[in-house]
């Protein structure tokens, strides 16, 4: 998940860290501990590495010190806002197999798009690139699911107008869930761009409200660590 997944999909050129969504069970956590030890990875910030903390939606941050990965940051999560539980995401994943046979599992593009709907401005161009790339790759293989995804998630005004013209019935059916498609259907580009900007702001506010209580918990974690002198 995160920026590295966007790099694999061609929606970004660089990411400074690696974000992992993991299955929250005891066996998997034991394997994660072994992997972190092999990478000489130490926790660099609150919260602590604890399954109950991860289950609330927090990320735990590590810095690697092993040879070849010095300084690499790893962020681990078990829960993502407005996305289903791990098993469903795993079933929908994209798998890339390298020449040596190693497999890399990525969030599916629709799931990655949802995960990238954050307060950070830098994430929204990546969302646009993910959707545009998905459409370019599969434009000759439209399915009901793909058409719905394109109409629901396209961030480019010109692309939305073209989609509404190509799939008019599907666009009309989506008006209730995404009213700005009315501007795409009528070809009103200025109004459509304004509506797209408003949509981003609304989604950023949803993300802010989601993280607000978690940020308060983070402050409590920091105070607890300062008072307890924890460095583990």
Image: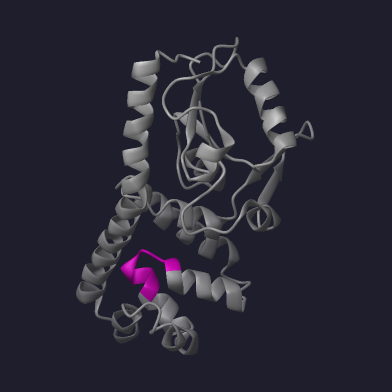
Q: Quadrant of residue 117?
A: bottom left
Could you tell me which residue is drawn at 45 percent across and 74 percent down? 151
Q: Nearer the viewer, residue 144 or 202?
A: 202
Which image quadrant is residue 25 in?
Answer: top right
Residue 178 as seen in the image, left or right of residue 132: left
Could you tell me which quadrant the N terminus lies in? top right
Q: Position of residue 127 (x, y in %)?
A: 42, 54
Q: Residue at x 47, y 52 (%)?
A: 115
Q: Position of residue 55 (x, y in %)?
A: 54, 44
Image location of residue 18, percent across then percent down: 52, 32
In the rendered image, residue 110 lying in the magenta stretch gets the answer no
232 in relation to 136, above or below? above
Residue 155 magenta-highlighted: yes
Q: Which of 65/151 is in front?
A: 65
Q: Position of residue 182 (x, y in %)?
A: 32, 84
Name the residue rendered at 36%, 51% in the picture.
Answer: 125
Asked if residue 75 lies left or right of residue 159, the reply is right
Residue 123 higher or lower than 184, as above or below: above
Residue 151 vertical position relative to residue 227 in the rendered view, above or below: below
The residue at the far top in this view is 67
Residue 159 visible in the current orientation: yes
The stretch in magenta equals: 153-160
């Amino acid at each position: 998940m995160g920026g590295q997944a966007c790099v694999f999909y061609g929606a970004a050129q660089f990411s400074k860290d690696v974000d992992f969504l993991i299955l929250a069970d005891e066996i998997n956590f034991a394997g994660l501990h072994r992997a972190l030890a092999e990478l000489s990875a130490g926790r660099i910030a609150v919260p602590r590495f604890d399954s109950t903390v991860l289950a609330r939606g927090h990320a735990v941050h590590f810095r690697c010190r092993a040879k070849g990965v010095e300084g690499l940051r790893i962020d681990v999560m078990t829960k993502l806002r407005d996305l289903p539980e791990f098993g469903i995401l795993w079933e929908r994943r994209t798998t890339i197999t390298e020449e040596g046979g190693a497999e890399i599992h990525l969030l599916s593009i629709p799931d990655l798009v949802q995960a990238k709907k954050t307060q950070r401005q830098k994430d929204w161009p990546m969302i646009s690139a993910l959707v545009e790339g998905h459409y370019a790759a599969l434009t000759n293989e439209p399915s009901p699911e793909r058409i719905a995804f394109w109409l629901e998630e396209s961030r480019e005004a010109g692309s939305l107008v073209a989609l509404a013209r190509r799939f008019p019935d599907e666009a009309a059916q989506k008006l209730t869930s995404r009213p700005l498609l009315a501007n795409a259907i009528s070809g009103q580009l200025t109004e459509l761009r304004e509506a797209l900007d408003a949509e981003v702001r609304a989604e950023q506010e949803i993300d802010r409200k989601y993280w607000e209580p978690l940020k308060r918990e983070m402050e409590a974690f920091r105070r607890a660590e300062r008072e307890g002198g924890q460095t583990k």
